[in-house]
Image (tube, helix red, strand yellow):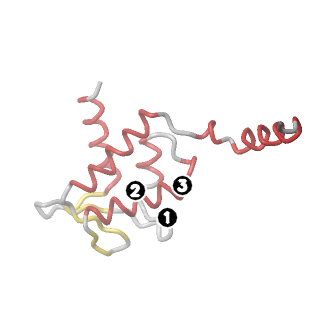
Amino acid sequence: MMNTRLISLIFLLFCCTGVYLHAREAKSDAEIEFLLGYVEKSGAIFIRNGSDHTAKEGADHLRDKLAQAGDRVKTAEDFINGIATKSYLSGQPYLVKMKDGSTRPAGPWLLEALVAHRKTNQ
């Protein structure tokens, strides 16, 4: 039989970690996953700090940044603004080079995709 003090300590540690307080809502997780898939399947060149990367490499980089951000990203907008818009280290904006050769900032490109996604999934 477990000691009451030990049970209380485990409960307190669980509560202090705030795990349940910082989890994203399922809708936000789904939207962020949509955006990551959108990048990965876009066929666009992902430009980060002046270097070209495949769409898959771009999505993988954003996944890594998302994992490091932890509970700071609660919504798809948080993801776009805090993760997918610019380099944390250099401050340079991320760009996407489209198949037609045009280049766009990643933030507005992803926001447009999110708005369209929400319209089709209402």
Tag 2: Cα neighbours inside 10 Å, few (<14), some, or many (≥20)?
Answer: many
First in residue order: circle 2 vs circle 3: 3
Q: Residue at x 40, y 56 (%)?
A: 85
Residue 63 lies, in percent from the top left, at 41, 57
Q: Nearer the viewer, mark 1 or mark 3?
A: 3
Residue pictured at 36% horizontal, 45% vertical: 33
- In primary-sequence order, the first of circles 1 and 3 is 3
Q: Nearer the viewer, residue 69 or 100?
A: 69
Q: Residue at x 42, y 42 (%)?
A: 76
Residue 111 position, x and y percent, is: 33, 44
Task: State the quadrant of the C terminus.
Answer: top left
Label 2 sits on a secondary structure element that is: loop
Question: Residue 79's x, y, as percent?
Answer: 44, 48
| Residue identified by numbered label 3 | 69
Can you say whether 42 is above or below 47 in the image?
above
Eyeballing the image, is 77 above or below 120? below
Q: Which mark is residue 30?
A: none
Q: CA distance from mark 2 to mark 3?
A: 14 Å
Mark 3 surroundings within 10 Å by alpha-carbon count, few (fewer than 14), some (14 through 19), many (20 or more): few
Discs 2, 3 touching: Cβ within 8 Å: no
In the rendered structure, the answer to whether residue 54 lies left or right of residue 13 reads: left
Q: Amino acid at mark 1?
A: Tyr
Mark in front: 2 vs 3 = 3
Q: Amino acid at mark 2?
A: Thr
Q: Nearer the viewer, residue 41 or 98?
A: 41
Total tally of numbered discs in the picture: 3
Task: Pinpoint residue 12: horizontal percent, then vertical percent.
Answer: 79, 39
Residue that label 2 marks? 85
The residue carrying mark 1 is 88
Disc 3 marks which amino acid? Ala
